[in-house]
Image: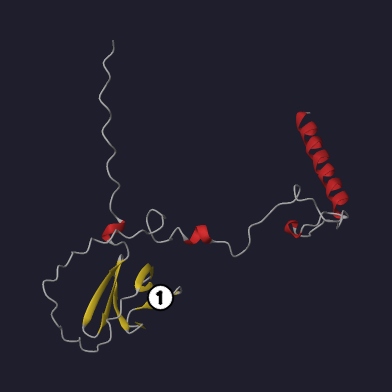
């Protein structure tokens, strides 16, 4: 008997859901974007009742949190050491330095990707906002990518070798230890 009642209850629920679906099938749905400022009737919606979306290009907070840093905090380089003060005794004439091209700075390493046996390094050339993936043997700004490890890339140029670490030592410095607790106050 209880099986019959249970079966009839389930059949009644299914029939009710079918009726709801049939009723909703013919109901029009407003698919206008909410951010357009128009309500369901096509008239302008009030500012208090509509959702406000940020502009599509406002990702400044995202770009301030680099993807490949362990803490996802903005990279702040360590302060430069103070320059020594030079005391001139007598002005001496120095020969002009030979006209040489300034050595090009190695690109900065932003990330490393390993897919099977192939590794690629995400490198950004100094003075550029764009970063590009480079594999072994490819050349970027005159530097040849000679090796890519799990946490560094090795670049070569004019016989010079530059090892670029993904996480330079100054980025991995642990935070200072917390100060010791204050001494207990004697009770009176």
Query: Would residue 81 be found to the left or right of residue 107 on screen?
Result: left
Query: Would residue 132 be found to the left or right of residue 145 on screen?
Result: right
Query: Would residue 82 be found to the left or right of residue 91 on screen?
Result: right
Q: Among all residues in the image, which is located at the extreme left?
A: 89
Is 83 or 174 nearer to us in this picture? 83
Q: Mark 1 points at which residue?
A: 127
Residue beneath the point at 16% across and 86% down: 95
Q: Among all residues in the image, which is located at the extreme front?
A: 90
Q: Where is residue 63 in the image (x, y as percent from the top left)?
A: 48, 62
Is 63 or 93 nearer to us in this picture? 93
Q: Position of residue 171 (x, y in %)?
A: 31, 57
Is 3 or 68 nearer to us in this picture? 68
Q: Which image quadrant: the C terminus?
A: top left
Q: Position of residue 65 (x, y in %)?
A: 45, 58
Instruction: Tell me the SS state at disc 1.
Output: loop
Q: Where is residue 41 in the image (x, y as percent from the top left)?
A: 87, 55
Q: In this view, does 45 lie above or below 147?
A: above
Residue beneath the point at 13% across and 80% down: 92
Q: Is residue 15 above or below residue 144?
A: above
Is 128 or 27 nearer to us in this picture? 128
């Amino acid at each position: 008997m209880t099986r019959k009642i249970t079966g009839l209850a389930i059949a009644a629920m299914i029939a009710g859901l079918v009726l709801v679906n049939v009723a909703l099938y013919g109901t029009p749905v407003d698919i206008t974007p909410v951010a357009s400022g128009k309500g369901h009737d096509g008239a302008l919606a009030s500012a208090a009742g509509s959702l406000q979306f940020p502009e599509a290009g406002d990702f400044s907070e995202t770009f301030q949190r680099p993807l490949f840093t362990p803490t996802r905090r903005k990279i702040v380089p360590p302060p430069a050491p103070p320059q020594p003060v030079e005391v001139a005794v007598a002005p001496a004439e120095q020969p002009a330095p030979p006209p040489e091209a300034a050595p090009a700075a190695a690109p900065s390493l932003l990330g490393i990707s390993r897919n099977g046996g192939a590794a690629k390094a995400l490198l950004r050339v100094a003075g550029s906002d764009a970063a590009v993936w480079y594999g072994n043997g490819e050349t970027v700004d005159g530097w040849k990518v000679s090796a890519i490890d799990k946490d560094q890339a090795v670049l070569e140029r004019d016989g010079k070798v530059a090892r670029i670490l993904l996480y330079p030592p100054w980025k991995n410095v642990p935070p200072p230890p917390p100060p010791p607790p204050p001494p207990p106050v004697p009770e009176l």
